[in-house]
Image: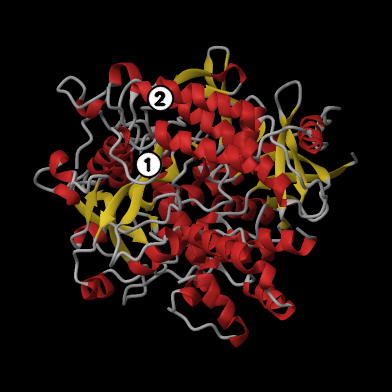
Amino acid sequence: MDEWERRLRWHCRRGMLEMDLLLQRFLDRYLATLTSDERGALEDLLKYDDIELTAFLNGRRECPDPRFASLLERIRGL
Amino acid sequence: MKVNKRTFDAVIVGAGGAGLRAALQLSEAGLKTAVLTKVFPTRSHTVAAQGGVAASLGNSEEDHWHWHMYDTVKGSDWLGDQDAIEFMCRKANEVVIELEHYGMPFDRLDNGKIYQRPFGGHMSNFGEKPVRRSCAAADRTGHAMLHALYQRNVRANTQFFVEWMALDLIRDQDGDVLGVTALEMETGEITIFHAKATLFATGGAGRIYYSSTNAFINTGDGLGMAARAGIPLEDMEFWQFHPTGVSGAGVLITEGVRGEGGILRNSSGERFMERYAPNAKDLASRDVVSRAMTTEIKEGRGCGPNKDYVLLDITHLDPKVIMSRLPGIREISIQFAGVDPIKEPIPVVPTCHYQMGGIPTNYTGRVVIPQGSDPEVVVPGFYAAGECACASVHGANRLGTNSLLDLLVFGKASGEAVIEDFKKMPKAHKELPKDAADLSLARINRLNTQTNGESVHEVQLAMRRVMQEHAGVFRFGDMLKQGVEKIMQIAERAARTEIKDKSQVFNTARVEALELDNLIEVAKATMVSAEGRKESRGAHVRDDAPDTPEFPNGRNDKEWLKHTLWYRDGNRLAYKPVHFQPLTVEPIELKKRAY
């Protein structure tokens, strides 16, 4: 694991269990396959609060930035 | 290894609700205050609190702090300290209104006052009928609270150390607390935070259980540090459980699922609740359902390869009903259990939610330990608040919405205690002992040099399984005895963990190993304390202490109306009396706890 990945994994430690679980699974499945644009977008996505991320993921709120759409879809893992 | 040193008036560990509330008190009083936190403050686990905060504001109907106090004492199954409970209930209105002034967006009534809703266990007129006492900000009360408190702290110049993990408490020969050592994740360096006051607000340790609603960060760091420094942990046998969490994941399945016709089944497909509660069946109360599920699993009728869960079946319901009346359940089930509940039943298990015990404090937030014949002597320089502390207001069982109240009241009170103690302290900091960082350095060094060691992940999993199986929601004498032996063996393994990654910058493997050091102390404390308490009370329910006329609900006040203290040294237990005398009113006399 390189430094970027270790740091990113820590930023997936969240206040809500649901987010911990979804993000950890996402990283395990997809991290190795992300493009550098996606890696940048993921870093920015993680800056949202858990409550906002949850709302994006369960569709209660539309995510304002289209850069995140495909990441959110994979994190949702349905 | 080089050790840095920083000096502050006060150092707070943890930036959830309690830590932020305490920090605000200190910074606004002009104290130079450092707050150490593993994650950004607004990502603390307080964010997951949805229910609200209890306060007898009486905005919708008549209410009184004395009624709230009665409910809390009763909820605690009389194990709560009545002075602390009176203090908390009387302070509730003040801390809620303060929070409103900090900008907390509470839901409101048309007349502009804070809207209040009813919540389980909160009653008017000493247990007569439900009362509207919970103040909420939609379903994001904890989130809103963290944001309001964080902003206010920024204004007050609180200094945050984000992505720092506190490692060990520094105590000198007199037993005084002089700060903590901490690991900066960014650099991997160790720093001593030398302070006149050290305040722990590190939250709970629900991650000791296999099935837990707690976020991954809830590793009981404060409890582990306290235990290693010789501070006993109080009432650690008491943990609140929810009957239906997704097995392994811990995400809750709302009780509404059983309300809509969901059925619990064992490995042979039997609807086992018919045997335990012939009338209410799957709609029996939480404790009855949890007990039945645990009994099925213990007797070998659990499902799955490890026979360690039961099934919640809604496949017989019309998919349209599932989608319309139970929105989100299908998604949760697919995401966290990997099954579509329209086609397959959901694996569920009683799931740990909240830790009632913790670092022993009095109602001012000062940490107190037995010394000589006095069971409660203040440890100079040491304070604790929130879920990591045991004041004790929740006793053997916590009422909903009292946890956010706890962290506000005791966050503030502990801050005030620091300020008061500061006035009496000499100007200079007490000198640090020469070996102040030795324990932390030795722990880091061991991790760096361990060979043929144990995997952190495997030891953690073994611990969580043993806790779930042997000290879960419903407990058996023989299982607890075995559990003590097993957890002590796992503790030996935890002392020999090995990490492959020895890098300095953001070494999360190292952080997780250090977290396990804390979890294992909490696990031992829980198992040993639970084995020791030979009665049922509140959330601690034993098969061999059943409901009888002599001991209603299995509670034995003659022998067990006392707090447990677990010491890491010698893995031993001691007990201390419950404070039955409130501050200004008559004690709430013992009664059978029934709703």
CA gap, disc 1 and disc 2: 17 Å
Residue drawn 74% across the image and 38% down it:
B179
Work out whether residue B63 can be spotted: no
Q: What residue is disc 1 on?
A: B308
The answer to whether B536 is drawn above or below residue B200 in the figure is above
- B585 left or right of B174? left
In which image quadrant can residue B510 be found? top right
Q: What residue is disc 2 on?
A: B480
In which image quadrant can residue B170 be found? top right
Classify the position of the C terminus of chain B by image quarter.
Answer: top left
Q: Disc 2 on helix, strand or loop?
A: helix
* x and y percentages locating residue B218 in the rendered image: 55, 47
* x and y percentages locating residue B417 in the rendered image: 60, 40
Residue drawn 68% across the image and 41% down it:
B513
Q: Mark 1 lies on which chain?
A: B
Within-10-Å neighbours for mark 2: few <14, some 14–19, many 20+: many
* x and y percentages locating residue B217 in the rendered image: 59, 51
Residue drawn 19% across the image and 71% down it:
B318
* x and y percentages locating residue B204 in the rendered image: 52, 44
Within-10-Å neighbours for mark 1: few <14, some 14–19, many 20+: many
Q: How many labels does the image show?
A: 2
Looking at this rendering, what residue extends furthest in the right direction? B2
Classify the position of the N terminus of chain B by image quarter.
Answer: top right
